[in-house]
Image (cartoon, rainbow, N blue to C red):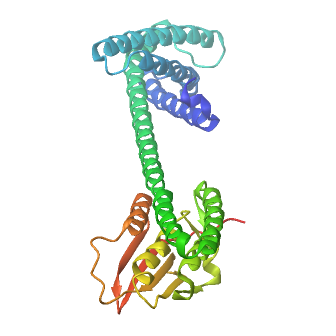
Amino acid sequence: MHPLFGRASRFLLYSAGWLVLGVLLALPLAGLTHRPLGGVLAFTVPLCVVYGQVCLAAWWVCLSRPLSEPVRAALSQLTAALLCATIWGVTATVWGNVLARAQGLGAPDRAMLFNDVAVLFGLGVPLYLLSAVAHYLYLAIEEAHASAQRSLALQVSAREAELRAVRSQLNPHFLFNSLNSINALVGSDPEGARRMCEGLGDFLRRTLQLGAREAVTLDDELALVDRYLAIEQVRFGARLAVERDVAPEARACLLPPLLLQPLVENAIKHGVADRVEGGIVRLSARLADGALRIALENPVDPDARARAGEGMGLDIVRKRLAALGDARLDAGRVDGLYRVTLTLPWETARA
């Protein structure tokens, strides 16, 4: 179906344009032949509106003869232009004779009718070719739009694949560290190892639930962090303390699932675990400047040798945020503390 038929407003606007052309054509004809303007309008306006519908045939010719075959396309369009102009001339002859039988319409006589038909035939060819050009332009624009949509879809698919690949690294990394911790407790604290296994099972069930979502609330993410901290509390006991300062309005904000756990794990592994006395992990969340800002701090042993790189946990989170494109992670030492700051778009869950 022709795209013009998809919306009545477009079709009416298109027909109105041909009606205006009929009026403009009637003015010089009436002046040159000294006929009443009303009679000439009765002759030219219906013919132009009808020819406007005939010119829509260029759509199907354009589809069957794309510009990738320029010679065949040109021959086909020229043939169609001559055919449509001939049809217009025949229609004009019939319509002129109909008007000639009517009284008081100022229809052209035979000589004038012949001249009028010749004029219409001469105009019909370029008018059809203009219609063909317009149709080719429309098809080119549609193809460019479709190509842009396909490109965008491919980019989205590539980004989703990258996110899935990065997220798939998370659980193996966490399990490796957790199993090492359980192994360390088996000999010295079997009961603690058992509780740690139970906590690990509960944590993994929760990660399966949250990991299947595209986004979770900060409240859900913090609940998962609590399960992880319960596991680590078995290992570190009083050496591990957690302070949390989360603004109530931030709890409903959305963020990618399993984003905070690797950061907390990194803070414990490379901060608290390196210190004999342990330390405090501080987590805060605020809304500021249209963004959700999450900060995580842990103490750093000043005598500990500086690590090469940031660790896998930070690397995974940084890659995930880079794939999102509109979030960032900043990390570094500040006054004896290691501070990680996440900045994400402020979007709240819909009720």
Residue situated in front as seen by the camera: 338 or 124 = 338
How many dots with numbers?
Answer: 0
**Image check: 41 left or right of 304?**
right
Whether residue 106 is situated above or below residue 335 in the rendered picture:
above
Residue situated in front as seen by the camera: 125 or 285 = 285
Residue 13 appears anywhere in the view: yes
Give the percent coordinates (x, y) of residue 87: 49, 9
Q: Residue at x 51, y 20 (%)?
A: 51
Give the percent coordinates (x, y) of residue 253: 60, 71
Whether residue 186 is situated above or below residue 243 in the rendered picture:
above
Give the percent coordinates (x, y) of residue 303: 29, 89
Residue situated in front as seen by the camera: 324 or 86 = 324
Give the percent coordinates (x, y) of residue 334: 35, 89
Check the picture and name the quadrant holding the N terminus.
Answer: top right
Q: Residue at x 65, y 82 (%)?
A: 248
In the image as oriented, which residue stretches furthest toward the right? 351
Q: Residue at x 64, y 9 (%)?
A: 101
